[in-house]
Structures are given as C-alpha cells and as structure tokens.
Amino acid sequence: MKRDVRFPNATGVQLAGSLEVPPARIRAVALFAHCFTCTAQSHAARRVSLALAEQGIATLRFDFTGLGQSDGAFADSHFGANVEDLVAAAAFLESDVGAPAILIGHSLGGAAVIAAADRIPSSKAVVTIAAPFDPRHVLHLIQGAHDIADTPRDVSIGGRPFRIGREFLTSVEGQDQAARLARLKRALLVLHSATDATVGVENARAIFEAAKHPKSFVALDGADHLLTDAEQAQYVAQIIAAWVQPFLGPAMAIDAVPEGHVRVSSTDAKFVQIVESSGHSFLADEPLAAGGSDYGPTPYDLLLSALGTCTAMTLKLIAEKEGIPLTGVSVVLHHSRRHADDCAAAAGGRPQIEVIERRIALQGDLTEAQRMRMLVIADKCPVHRTLESRPVIETRLV
C-alpha cells in the first residue's frame, strides 16, 4: 500500500516521497536512497521498495532536494545535502511508522547511506547496491565538471541538463568512506554486478574490504547499473529481506490474537482494514468504484469466502471418509438482493431477501448418486449452518 508523504529537511525544504507499507503488520522499517540524478520513481527505488513491502518491510523512497517532486533547486543539492536529507527522512519515519533499522542506497545513494549511518542511531543494517567506494566517482559523469567556478552553471549529466555549483564539487571531496566503513558498527550487505558498466565491481571490493564484520557480498549476475530488469529488482529485495533478519532483533510487538478469534484494525486509508487471525494477516478494502483502494477483498467477499472454503473442505473430508472418488472441488459464490422477492416479502413483514448463489463443480469419476450425496453434504457445512441459524451478534464496547 503506497502512501505519498512530504516532510521538511534541515533547511525547511519540503521533500516528497512514497512510503510503501506492507499489506499486513510491519516487520521492520527501511529507508531507500536513490541513485545520482534519479528520483524515487527510478526502477530500482520503486521495484525494490514494493518488493520489500511484500516481505513485511515498510520502505520510504524519497526525492533528494531539487529532484522529482521535492522542492528546492538541484544547484543547492550536493553529497552533504543528500546525507542531511537522509537524516531528515529517518526522523520523519520515526515519527510516522517507526525508526528505520535498514538503510539502503543505490549507486551514489549507497555512498550517502554509509555517510549517514552514524547519524541515524536506529539503523542496524546498511545495504549498498551498485555503489561507488568514493563519492568523487560521480564526477566522471558530469561533462565539464572541473570548469565550474563559484557561480552555478548548467552541465550535462547523462545527456540531461542540470545546474550545479562549486559546492557540489567540493562536497564530494575529502569524504573518508574507508574510515566510515571501519567504524560503521552495523551489518553491511554489498550488492553489485560484475558487469556494471557505470560503477565497476572494484568499488564493491573496496567497500567490502574497508568494512568490518558482520558483512556480506552478493553478486548480481547479469544486472545492469539501474536494475531495469524487474526480476533482478525482485531478487535484490528478497536477498535484503532474508539477509537482514538476524540483525533486526525481536519483531515489532504485536498483541497475539487468541485461537478462534479475529481482530480487525483500521488504517489511515479510507476503507483499508488489517485482518488478523491464527497467526495470519491480510487487508480488506472496497473496490475503486466504491471509493476504496482495492487492496483486498470486500467484507462480502470475505463472507462468501468463508462459505466457499468451508463447503470445499467439508466435501473433500466427507468424500475421503466415504470413499467417494472426488479429486477436486470448485465453488463459485455470489451475493445479491432479489428486489421482486423483497417487495413481495415486505407485505408479510419480511423485507430484505438476501440471496447467496453457490455453484459447485465436482471433479472425479463420481456416479450420479455420489454427486447428489455431495450436494446434500454441501448444505451441511458448518458455515452454511451458521448462516442459516441467524446467529445472535452480541456487541459491546471495550
């Protein structure tokens, strides 16, 4: 579930980002720093953040000052400013969903998270993706970089025009990344492709050798620098989610839901609800046409699902017990109000005729008698009986 956010950096400039929230409970919080001149909508930032959310890790990707949807001018942005933006983003996360335990940086963003780690006390793990060892590496991408004087001027970066000033150049000078890595005191994961034509794999080796344990290196075979391949981005997210677990400590505290109980909790979204039961959790929502976000089944979908699953389970159980060669069951259900029947019933004081249509397909070499037996059993499934018994619903405030 994506939520657009805005927050101020240290100078008051409003930064824009997207917070990818897991479909259920949050296991951890991550902060993603995009590559040089990229935005939060880059392939790597978007795909990795989405995939991490699927793994239960809420991830904020945001635009650095002067890029994408963030305010400010790119001429005022530089490596040091990027680090400040990361610290501001971490503070925002701490006040919103939780302090970030994982810092992830792509390309120059990787160098930035290494520099920012000391200033984000909550961080326990740092991940670099195709990152340069020295921030000065970015200068070779800037045409005419060394001709820049005190006055900002337009330069070409990757064929696109950007206005940068002298401070940008001086900011990448004198960054002792080796010393920062030596005192990192956080788990480090280095992800890099041996065929990266933009930032050579020798940078990964320098980062890895400068850091102390615990540290890990994973080769991204066949990946390009920008992770434009969706499967590669998904693979990166899976690696990060699995690798980071030992360094996160206990999971965020969640009150256990007793066996046989269901808990439904609201979210900031209009209709989205978190449903928890027996160690499982998922989202419920309304469709787009009804004003929802379509992040999960509707309440009536869940009602029909209960009847459908119970029907199929009961049929399989009885068929096995009675030796009926049932190999598969498919149940299609639909809920509706029959207006004509409703009107007719109103005269007798019984309006609102609710109808659930259930269509059952049986697989297997069943005789006609066995098929009829299955039809009888369908009406005896526990959920069917509960619905027909018109249970009393007792409600109280707690």
Image: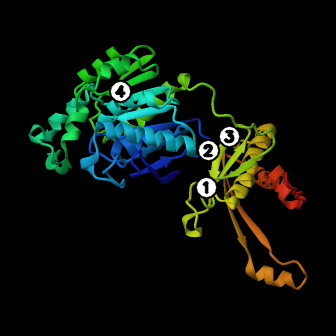
Instruction: From the image, state whether disc 1 or disc 4 is nearer to you.
Output: 1
Does the residue at mark 2 contact the one at mark 3 (Cβ under 8 Å)? Answer: no
Q: Secondary structure at mark 1?
A: loop
Mark 4: secondary structure: strand
Report, in whole angstroms, how far the alpha carbon at label 2 lies from the one at label 4.
28 Å
Spatial CA distance of label 1 from label 4 is 35 Å
Along the polypeptide, which appears first: circle 2 or circle 4? 2
Badge 2 is on which residue?
24
Label 4: how many residues lie within 10 Å, few (<14), some (14-19) or many (20+)?
A: many
Tag 2–tag 1 contact (CB < 8 Å): no
Choose the circle earlier in sequence order: 3 or 1. Answer: 1
Circle nearer the N terminus (2, 3):
2
Name the residue type under label 1.
Answer: Asp
Residue 381 visible (yes or no): no
Q: CA distance from mark 3 to mark 4?
A: 32 Å
Label 3 environment density (alpha carbons within 10 Å; few <14, some 14–19, many ≥20): few
- Depth check, front residue: 387 or 45: 45
Q: Are marks 3 and 1 in contact (CB under 8 Å)?
A: no
Residue type at mark 3 is His
Eye-nearest disc, 2 or 3:
2
The residue carrying mark 3 is 280
Q: Are marks 1 and 4 in contact (CB under 8 Å)?
A: no
Horizontal and vertical percent position of residue 374: 77, 51
Q: Earlier in the sequence, mark 1 or mark 4?
A: 4
**Marker disc for residue 268:** 1
Which one is nearer the viewer's eye here, 211 or 362?
211
Give amino acid for label 2: Ala
**Image: 397 above or below 277:** below
Judged from the image, the secondary structure of the residue bearing numbered disc 3 is strand
* Residue at 90% over, 80% down: 349
